[in-house]
Image (cartoon, rainbow, N blue to C red):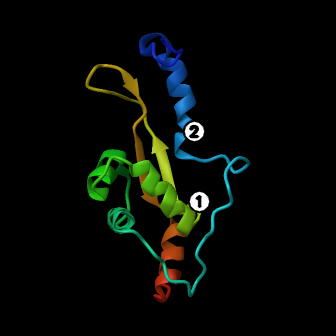
Amino acid sequence: MKGPHMDTKKNAPAMLKNTASACTSDPTTSRAPIVAEPGDSLKLSPRQARVLAVLRPGGWVSREQIDREAGSSNGPDVIARLRVKLGHDAIDCERQPAIDRDGKPCLPGAYRLTDAGRERLRQLEGRPAA
């Protein structure tokens, strides 16, 4: 059996159009995040802590680097769980068109900690404003 998504050559442009939203969630279909409040302790898994350490310095971090640092191949899931803890606006995602090693178009993602995310972390860690 071959589904419509299996013929990548024929459906590549449509697949690329549909994956642009993979970096964001639809607030009408997802549960509201439970964002930690100042004074709460931020409980992170070891994977989440490693990914957050890579995001802290700033700049865009590729999904591949997130996977390497997390020690797994589920970087987007780790990012999603961090967004639940820090707020959806805490981590940005950007998809940029690229060509993979097979010469096929793809949209690899990159992530960065936003100013709102940095501020929320500062508050949760009890550090004074810069």
Mark 1: secondary structure: helix
Residue 127, given in percent of the width and then of the height, sits at 46, 87
Tag 2 or tag 1, which sits nearer the N-term? 2
Vertical placement of residue 21 versus 33, above or below: above
For label 2, the crowd category at 10 Å Cα-Cα, with few meaning under 14, some 14 to 19 and many 20 or more, is: few
Vertical placement of residue 13 versus 19, above or below: above
Vertical placement of residue 112 versus 20, above or below: below
> Which residue is at a point 61% across and 70% down the rendered structure image?
35
Residue 43, given in percent of the width and then of the height, sits at 46, 76
**Image check: 101 left or right of 91?**
left
Q: How far, Cα to Cα, is label 1 from label 2?
A: 14 Å
> Which residue is at a point 37% across and 62% down the rendered structure image?
55
Residue 37, given in percent of the width and then of the height, sits at 61, 79
Residue annotated with mark 1: 88
For label 1, the crowd category at 10 Å Cα-Cα, with few meaning under 14, some 14 to 19 and many 20 or more, is: many
Residues marked 1 and 2 touching at CB (< 8 Å): no
Q: Quadrant of residue 120?
A: bottom right
Q: Quadrant of residue 102?
A: top left
Mark 2: secondary structure: helix
Residue annotated with mark 2: 21
Q: Please, which residue is most extreme toward the right here?
A: 28
> Which residue is at a point 54% across and 68% down the rendered structure image?
86
Q: Nearer the viewer, residue 60 or 44?
A: 44
- Disc on res. 123: none
Give the number of callouts.
2
**Image check: 56 left or right of 84?**
left
> Which residue is at a point 44% across and 49% down the rendered structure image?
76
Q: Nearer the viewer, residue 103 or 58?
A: 103
**Image check: 48 left or right of 87?**
left
Residue 88, given in percent of the width and then of the height, sits at 59, 59
Going by the numbered disc 1, the residue's amino acid type is: His
Going by the numbered disc 2, the residue's amino acid type is: Ser
